[in-house]
Amino acid sequence: MQLSRTNLADIVYFLAIARHQSFRKAGLEVGISASALSHAIKGLETRLGVRLLNRTTRSVTLTAAGEELQGLISAPVNDIGQALETLNRLRDEPAGRIRLNVLSDGAKLLLGPVLPVFVDRYPDIEVDLTVTNRMVDVIGDGHDAGIRYGGTVPEDMIAQRLSPDVAWAVVGAPDYLERFGTPIHPEDLFQHRCLRVRLGNARIYHWQFSKEGQQLEIDAPGAITIDETRVGVAMAMRGAGLMYVPAWVVERQIAEGSLQRVLEDWTHHDPGFHIYYSSFRQIPIGIRLLIDLIRELEPMGPLP
């Protein structure tokens, strides 16, 4: 079989399927639909005269021929990709596509001020942004990198800091505080209505507090559980309860008086936003340029 343009493209598709064991996830990586991917692989199998994949309604696995093909071509195709990426760094105008998975807070606070500048500076780089608070396999789902708070970055990834540490604030509407009183100690929260926070892994977050060496975790009580900061801020402003939120998210509301901060002397700090990516894949030049621009503009303040 000759190495035509069609065959080379189908080989790239095959390797994506082999990595992800899923047509859907592989399609996200290579930018085509699962059905088109399946059709392309059937064509490749026909031209080769062997079956490469075992397909069921629930899974996709490699046949013996598929495993042998993957072993033979993975390294050469990866070398070609790295060579092309190296050449991309030598262009006067870098090009390509970067795929990011980002927390909603990070998308608003970190990327919101930066991406307009980025696309003006690098018009030939496409940015594919997925905003979600769910914990996902960023690389497995076809993304080049993810942005999360530093404490939640998977240990097997390379991580680089993009923002200062996050200070966590407890806030409530003036009407709520007038009605239910102002907590003085974190344990006073057991007498309050709190907006509970569900993390991306479905776990309910325990509010953390620090003061003069003391560390407290409070399983805040409340009838409402949220997993989206903007929704929680809107509900807190309407007096639904106290909210535990990164302080920089509610700076404007505090300045305007629609929210008031409480327990400020018990403020807890966590690592700020980090970008992370696989140590086993060459990072696209677009990701490196984005990191450099975020550090240049410092949209959330100077890095420590």
Image (spheres, rainbow, N blue to C red):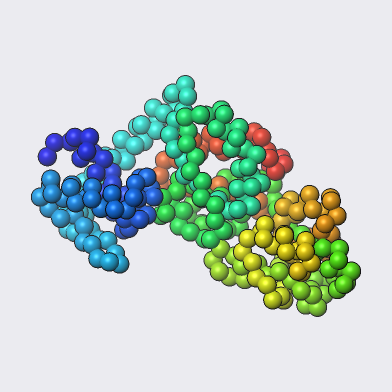
**Residue 39 vertical placement versus 96 (above, below):** below
Task: Count all numbered tags in the image, as a single digit.
Answer: 0
**Residue 300 visible here:** yes
**Residue 15 visible here:** no
x then y, percent, for residue 28: 39, 50
Q: Quadrant of the C terminus?
A: top right
x then y, percent, for residue 27: 35, 50
Q: Which residue is rendered at x = 36% and y = 36% of the image?
A: 82
Q: Residue furthest left?
A: 49
x then y, percent, for residue 192: 79, 75
Query: Does residue 126 appear left or right of residue 260 in this picture?
Result: left
Q: Quadrant of the N terminus?
A: top left
Q: Nearer the viewer, residue 153 or 61?
A: 61
Q: Which residue is rendered at x = 86% and y = 66% of the image?
A: 175
Q: Residue furthest front?
A: 238
Query: Does residue 115 appear left or right of residue 249 in this picture?
Result: left
Q: Nearer the viewer, residue 296 or 51?
A: 51
Q: Which residue is rendered at x = 66% and y = 46% of the image?
A: 109
Q: Which residue is rendered at x = 21% and y = 46% of the image?
A: 72
x then y, percent, for residue 198: 61, 67
Q: Nearer the viewer, residue 200 or 265?
A: 200
Q: Residue furthest top?
A: 92
